Image (cartoon, coloured by chain):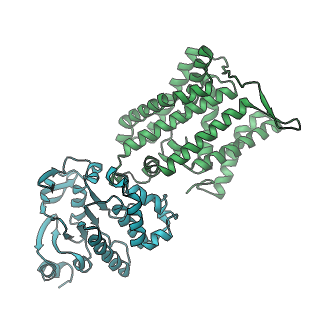
Chain colours: A green, B cyan
Amino acid sequence: MSLIFGLLDIANIAQPAFLIAGSYAAYVLNSAYGVDPIVVGVALTPLFYLIGAGVYRVYYATFERRGEESLRGLVFFFGLLFIIEVSLSMRFGVDYRMAQAAYVGKSIDLGGGVGVAYRYLVPCLVGLAMTLTLYVFLGRTFYGRAIMAVSQDQGALRLMGANPIHIKTIAFGIGIAAASLAGALLVTIAPVIPSTDRDYIGRMFAITVLGGMGSIGGTLVAAVILGVAETLMATFFGPSWSLAVSFGILLLALAVRPAGLFGR
Amino acid sequence: MVRAVEAGYGAVRVLHGVSLEVREGETVALLGTNGNGKSTLIKCIMGMVAPAGGEIFLEREGRRVDLTRKSTEEIVSLGIALVPEGRRLFPKLSVEENLLLGAYRAQARAGIARNLAFCFEAFPVLRARRRQLAGSMSGGEQQMLAIARALMSSPQILLVDEPSVGLAPILVSRVIAKIKELKEQYQLTVLMAEQNFNQATKIADRGYIIVHGKIEFEGRDTRELRENELVKKYYLGV
């Protein structure tokens, strides 16, 4: 999300649908063949990369090239969100689905009665590794730097010898692949239904903006802040307050730092 | 080499059969006041504006490469770099990130460390500010960065569009002097569009004067340019 919305300026609200699609892909292969859901998630990233690249090409050909990106583009992604969600509902029903892995149910004891379940620890570490990989990719490679530059001045990027459409296709593919892997992590941690994506639309935007558009490190920090705040609110005041907290923190933070926590 | 190029935007024709030639190793000035088609011509050469007619080509090792049907990226990969009008930096990237993006084309990536060292040597201010965001620098520094970024692609031909715009006079002469210095150091071929006649003729071998989309005068050396009637009319107000 940070990549696509933060760096490309494309308001892809279908992003959480790809998250859930990743969850279901991991769930299906996990329950059918017993493959570890996270291994499935990693193995399927090339496929989701191609899907993401394809989606951007369609979006480019039908909307962006004609300069109709803002409002109609939003409708395009909204439609995509529903198509994915409804397809998943029709194929798998609306029951909660969850993946199984060898380490689920086990935990490390940290002493003093505090323990960390592997069910949380493993996805957390994989998520951190993915974030770090993206961070290094953006800062250290030619493609990464071009992705950071593309929304600032496409014409100037052409003068560097890079095709902006090609660069955006790569970025979109990576964004979707990352979402699908995150979905595989999610289905390992908690059960998922096709409409879970709706819970994440607002959060994803809030985190991206709070972290500072396109800053990978900022996105991670913002996600932790909002996650902890939501959990605290849910514990002490009831879960219905959770989303209000996300946006409350977002508004407060933006009043102080309009570019987001780590925005440039 | 540009021959009989016609171009415009929509119904407005800007260039009416412009022809000019830049030979290897030369510094050629394209002179004219605002709105006469200098930038449009530069954009045609770079593939940023499609010409309606005429030919634009590169002659290299006896072979002729047609530029009119190529994309900007392909033209850049042939070793032609542009320092664009208004600098067109990536304001939210650091100085160093801007420079590294300059070396995007495949042929430039091998020499990236050497080119970066050259750029920092030629522009010490960029080394000092390598971590600073490009958008937060002064106009003169930004112009230096734009030139350095273009050089990062190891070009053989450098096009410079209006390097003096928006700069204080002292900075203009510094930028112009720098272009000459770099041209000699890198053995570049330079085509510079400029409205600051005095500054441009300091470093040009020869030049053209463009008026209302037509080449009105071709000066075979700077003396011919300086003593031309058009120059007196347009620049000196005589």
User: Residue B150's quadrant in the figure?
Assistant: bottom left
Residue A246 is situated, as x and y percent measured from the top left of the image, at 69, 43
The answer, for residue A204, to whether it is visible in the render is yes
Residue B47 is situated, as x and y percent measured from the top left of the image, at 24, 52
Residue B145 is situated, as x and y percent measured from the top left of the image, at 40, 66
Residue B84 is situated, as x and y percent measured from the top left of the image, at 32, 62
The answer, for residue B52, to whether it is visible in the render is no
Between residue A33 and residue A95, name the one nearer to us: A33
Which residue sits at x=54%, y=36%? A178
Between residue A178 and residue A133, name the one nearer to us: A133
Which residue sits at x=34%, y=77%? B172
Which residue sits at x=16%, y=50%? B66
Between residue B9 and residue A188, name the one nearer to us: A188
**Residue A63 in the image: above or below residue B119:** above
Between residue A79 and residue B200, name the one nearer to us: B200
**Residue A90 in the image: above or below residue A36:** above
Q: Quadrant of the N terminus of chain B?
A: bottom left
Q: Quadrant of the C terminus of chain B?
A: bottom left
In the picture, measured across the screen, residue A10 lies left or right of residue A114, that is left
In the picture, measured across the screen, residue A220 lies left or right of residue A151, that is right
What is the total number of numbered labels drawn onto the structure image? 0
